[in-house]
Amino acid sequence: MRGEILGVERRRFWHDDEKLEIVMSVGVGGASVTQVAQRHEIRRQQIYAWRHDLKKKGLWSPDAGALFYPLDVPVADAALVAQPTVVEPSKPTAVEVRLRGGRCLHFDSAIDPVALTGLIRAVEIA
């Protein structure tokens, strides 16, 4: 059996910063994974693999650009302490709280703090 080499093998090396730039360009201006892959002459699956590797290295997060606010709920002797009334924003916003064990709570910012605390405790116990 005889084989013929028709061209030079093209194998490129990508640094993590280049991979990160490509992965983060997905969604910018409505660009899909396919469009970004075609633009950089790689396969779609390569972008997904890079996402996975960069996430494992702690260099990329699917929540990039998300806003996180500290949540401080004072507790005294296992009873809730009443907090001063806080002026709510004019429009409620969507909030996501990530708990231990990979659990997530999605709720509206207008939720009652006492109800939210009870909900978090119930989910933590479950």
Image (tube, rainbow, N blue to C red):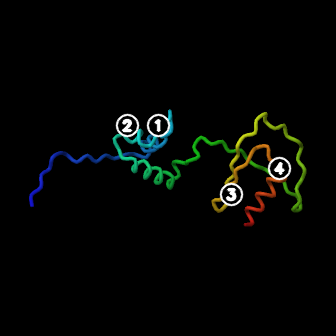
Precedes in sequence: disc 3 or disc 2: 2
Relative to 29, does residue 10 appear above or below in the rendering?
below
Q: What SS does tag 4 mark?
A: helix
Badge 1 local density, few (<14 within 10 Å), some, or many (20+)? few
Name the amino acid, label 4: Pro
Q: In which quarter of the image is residue 41?
A: top left
- Residue 77, image x, y percentages: 89, 62
Instruction: State the residue at coordinates (80%, 47%).
Output: 111
Amino acid type, residue under disc 3 in the picture: Leu
Residue 39 badge:
2
Instruction: Say if mark 2 contacts mark 1, CB within 8 Å.
Output: yes
The residue singled out by tag 3 in the image is 99
Kind of residue indicated by mark 2: Arg
Distance from Cα at disc 2 to Cα at disc 1: 10 Å
Is residue 43 shown left or right of residue 56? left
- The mark total stands at 4
Residue 31 image label: 1
Tell me how far mark 3 sits from mark 2, CA to CA.
38 Å
Of marks 2 and 4, which one's residue comes earlier in the chain? Answer: 2
What residue is shown with label 4?
113
Q: In which quarter of the image is the N terminus?
A: bottom left
